[in-house]
Amino acid sequence: MSKKVLVIGAGLAGSEAAYFLAQKGIKVVLFEVKTKKLNPAQKFTNFAELVCTNSLKSMVESTPHGLLKLEMSAFGSLILEVAYKNQVPAGDALAVNRELFSLEVTNILKNHPNIQVVEEDVEDPLKLLKDYEAQFVIMATGPLTTDAMTNWIVKNISGEDFYFYDAIAPVVDSDSLDYSKLYFKDRHEPYDPDLDKRADYLNAPMNKEEYEKFVEALATAEKVPAKDFENYKYFESCLPIDTMAERGKDTPRFSCMKPIGLERPDGTRPYACVQLRRENLLGDAFNLVGFQTRLTYKEQLRVFRMIPGFENASFIHLGSVHRNSYLNSKKLLREDFSSIEFPSIHFAGQMTGVEGYTESASMGLYVAYQVYRKLNGQSAISFPKETAFGALVNYIFTAPKPVPSNINMGLFPSVELSKEQRKRRSEIKSIKKEMVVERAKKTLSEFLKENPC
Ligand SMILES: Cc1cc2nc3c(=O)[nH]c(=O)nc-3n(C[C@H](O)[C@H](O)[C@H](O)COP(=O)(O)OP(=O)(O)OC[C@H]3O[C@@H](n4cnc5c(N)ncnc54)[C@H](O)[C@@H]3O)c2cc1C
């Protein structure tokens, strides 16, 4: 029998998994529902859609996200390769033109000789395995898995505890803004009139009175009610701006509206600031950074037009809240993300308990690598937790509660500083970061030498 794997969901993880296996000569059938129906966060039918921000986070090697990218590249990441080709300016972050990015991923996968694309809302992966005579299935249906598949997972694998809520930020049309009230400047970069309009961020400054009125309006505006209020729970790192406003009047000012490093062109620091990041190279649309929201559409128009420069703003799309699905992997899966109940079924991406575009994509590569080993008669293998891949997997299987996490320094084992290093107090944080990153690079390279991918 030829080696065949089914991948369900052509999002970030599914695209990575399908491409990894296809490049190794494995026949892949890739299922995607988008041409049949879009979920509430999706805008177009192409694969690997970035549904909220257009950023895949830092490219700096000495950051956890930079390190994760290095590791993904070692596994031949399609997502990163295409992202670098479709990059738009965003400082150290890897932001992309999302339409071009998705289009290119789609073309590559659809034209790959080892990939067959099937447009279908998959309802039963076990039946599919039989129908297609495949050895394994990788479920990469993401945080907004369709209802039918959710029912199947809940019934056969997870039980009830399978979702929480998340929110997305609005995008504003750049032509509708009043630029006399706004200024371009990247945080902590010196303001340079020659670079005016070339910075990646546009800033809407507020004085104390404007800020307090705005936060009051956010806190008291009408919100979209959750279907089941008991389960209205968010990622702490991605709280809606209105939830922050409800927590306290200064909460937004110490979070996404913080003014530090955003001095106006005249050198004065605003009381608070709304930051806008370019959505595409033309700069004809801006994302409101950190402004994911559960306000009703009507209230978003009223409240966001209180931002200086937004008096006549028109929005390309407004923010919204959505269900977000993930498994309690520790209880239900093995370390290679195969189901304990159904060993031929694997999960990948956000559903495994990671958070974020890059992390989800990386867990597509991780699972594809494990599946590839098994297709070749090898057993699944533990990744060293000193690596970014290993640190994410280790977190999922050791966290006391299943709370999705992005990659961060706290997930890596600690490093021992020498006496000499401990004396350099102000540098300790960056020394530690460097040591963690260097150790990860060395560990992965040794691991891949012994277990090539
Ligand atoms: C509303 C929202 C906003 C988010 N914003 C951000 C953000 O700004 N930054 C960030 O880093 N992360 C964000 N995330 C988190 C997450 O990292 C992304 O959603 C990421 O795309 C997850 O990758 P994935 O591959 O697991 O799933 P996805 O990229 O969602 O891919 C899943 C794919 O499976 C398809 N599918 C679903 N069910 C079926 C089925 N039954 N049959 C066939 N196909 C199916 C879907 O159409 C989709 O194409 C957000 C999540 C949500 C829900």
Image (cartoon, rainbow, N blue to C red):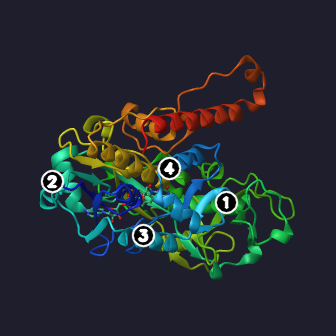
Would you place residue 422 above or below residue 157 in this image? above
Q: Which residue is mark 1?
A: 211
| Label at residue 108 | 3
Q: What kind of residue is marked 2?
A: Leu
Q: Which residue is mark 4?
A: 72
Crowd rating for badge 1 (residues with CA inside 10 Å; few <14, some 14–19, many 20+): many
Find the distance from the CA under tag 3 to the CA under tag 1.
Answer: 47 Å
In-front residue for pair 24/42: 24
In-front residue for pair 262/434: 434
The disc, 4 or 2, on the residue closer to the chain's N-terminal end is 4
The reply, left or right, for residue 340 in relation to residue 107 is: left
* Secondary structure at numbered mark 2: helix
The disc, 3 or 2, on the residue closer to the chain's N-terminal end is 3
Placement of the C terminus among the 4 image quadrants: top left
Find the distance from the CA under tag 4 to the CA under tag 1.
Answer: 41 Å
Residue 68 x %, y %: 53, 46
Residue mark closest to the camera, 3 vs 2: 3
The disc, 1 or 2, on the residue closer to the chain's N-terminal end is 2
* Secondary structure at numbered mark 4: helix
Find the distance from the CA under tag 3 to the CA under tag 2.
Answer: 28 Å
Q: What kind of residue is marked 1?
A: Tyr
Would you place residue 313 above or below residue 114 in this image? below
The disc, 4 or 1, on the residue closer to the chain's N-terminal end is 4
In-front residue for pair 243/27: 27
Find the distance from the CA under tag 1 to the CA under tag 2.
Answer: 54 Å
The reply, left or right, for residue 424 in relation to residue 352 is: right
Q: What kind of residue is marked 3?
A: Ile
